[in-house]
Image: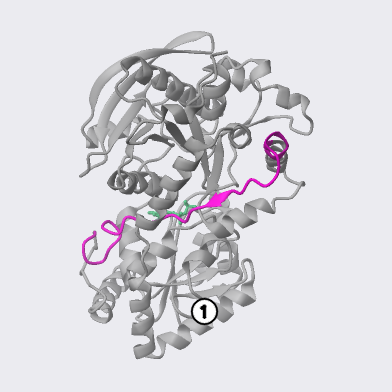
Amino acid sequence: MATHVPHHEKITMPLRVLVTGYEVAPFYKRGGLGDVLGSLPISLQKLGIDVRLVMPDYRSIKKEYPQKKIASFKVVFDKKEEEVTIFQGTLPKTTVTVYFLSNRRLISVINLKKKRIEEFIFFDLAVTGFINWLEAQGEYVPDLVHCNDWHTALIPLLLQRRMRSTIKTLLTIHNLGYQGKGSFSALDQAGIQDEELKLLSRRSPVTELNALGEGILHADAISTVSPQYAKEISKVRNRTKIYHYFRMREKERGRGEVIEGIVNGIDEMVWSPISGRVITRKYSIQTVKKGKSENKAMLLKKLGLPDRPTFSFIGRMAAQKGIGTIITTMKELSSRECNVIFLGSGDPKIEQSVKQIAKEYPKSVRAEIEYSEDFAYLLYAGSDFLLVPSLYEPCGLIQMVAMKYGTIPVASRTGGLIDTIKDGETGFLFESGSAKGLVAAVDKALGVYGKPAILERMRQRCMEQDFSWDKSAKEYVKLYESILTSSS
Ligand code: ADP
């Protein structure tokens, strides 16, 4: 093992942070993680951090965004040498460097449903090979690697145990519900030896690979995406497998470690009815009344819906998002003379039940089962209210985006929704999973809809909220500094 040099003695100025994750907007995005990784680095750079990104290189990226090939290196995977090519580009309209790691066999596939855990393990291994390559160049050696979610959660383990690296790591948990489970044998392909990881399998009750769990065990620090979700995580019970990883970490490091919750920001230039992309008419806080009614008229015309209060849902069709709560209340909602529009895709069963609801209520419900950013903009701009009935929500971006468009969220009282919505002022909150609660919140929303002056004021208050990254990026810098100066 290499001689241990306390890492803070080697801290470079400016701080060098390599951010890694599976999605980075606009190159590839399927949810909030993509938005976060596409915007946080821009604010970090403004604060003087030498931040760079490394992400998988999907074939679809190449056609749209310029990249140049800079080098290649070899990684041993499944006992074979695999070549990884490094392409370099920037986040569009910025100078933030993005590295794309490419391997035709194991990285190029974009279809998530068909992806196997081995492909993520390979990417994590490729990132460590890439860090080796960076070190060999000597031009940019990260002080800290910022990993995000389970897809990149094996990097801390690989860095520490395989590479004997002293580079520090932060793991940000964007969603504890997705952990990257698989057979331990998948690790054989990465050449991870027993002593490196499988000691876990002897620590019953952990019997299978849990990539996020490994990150929880090995990262120098863990954070999550809102203070409220950090509290919820700390209450994870021993019924769940992931609990054991938290316990193990606690045992190894001693009690009292606090999981930091830093609320996500949004790129307010992108998500803006005045400077961003709006399908029909631009509007500002001053012109919200007219702007929204014009956008709404276009939306309703397009969908063949009558002019009435309009509630939309935008998001992944996953159990987490609580679509079931809307469906259970559909009969009651339909008696209230309002429109309900769904945009999303995901779990086929949920997609099916949403389609069914649209069939049952043709006068008031529309279901767009797809991933469409254009349609999402249309909904943010043209809806009166956004339904966010999540059963749990680590942070949630859609409610913040909606507010920026003067669209009032009707959301469940959980996670980041509590941290970002002020009940009665910038939205309406109800108990998550409660059908009664949802109907009551919708009724409150309709009450406000019936009073145009109050409605306009509430919309304006939503638009006035500061969801920029400025504050949160500063908190990340503080966190990076504290990790780099801690002696553990
Ligand atoms: P999550 O990360 O759990 O999916 P968030 O609320 O944090 O949820 O972020 C969701 C992001 O993905 C938002 O930018 C939202 O606009 C976008 N999004 C989700 N579903 C769709 C869809 N069907 N079409 C277009 N954009 C979508």
Relative vertical location of residue 272 with respect to residue 340 in this rendering, above or below: above
- Residue nearest the observer in this picture, 8 or 32: 8
**Residue at position x 54%, y 33% from top?**
153
- Residue 74 horizontal/vertical position (percent): 40, 12
**Residue at position x 48%, y 36% from top?**
484
Start and end of the magenta stretch?
249-276
Quadrant observed for ligand 1 in the rendered image: bottom left
Dominant SS in magenta:
loop
Horizontal arrangement in the rendering, residue 291 relative to residue 30 (left or right): left
- Residue 278 horizontal/vertical position (percent): 24, 63
Quadrant holding the C terminus: top right
Q: Which residue is mark 1?
A: 442
Relative vertical location of residue 238 with respect to residue 398 in this rendering, above or below: above
Neighbours of disc 1 within 10 Å: few (<14), some (14-19), many (20+) = many
- Residue 48 horizontal/vertical position (percent): 30, 43
- Residue 196 horizontal/vertical position (percent): 64, 19
**Residue at position x 67%, y 36% from top?**
253
Relative vertical location of residue 187 with respect to residue 98 in this rendering, above or below: above
Quadrant holding the N terminus: top right
- Residue nearest the observer in this picture, 36 or 132: 132
Task: Check if residue 272 falls in the magenta segment.
Answer: yes
Element under label 1? helix
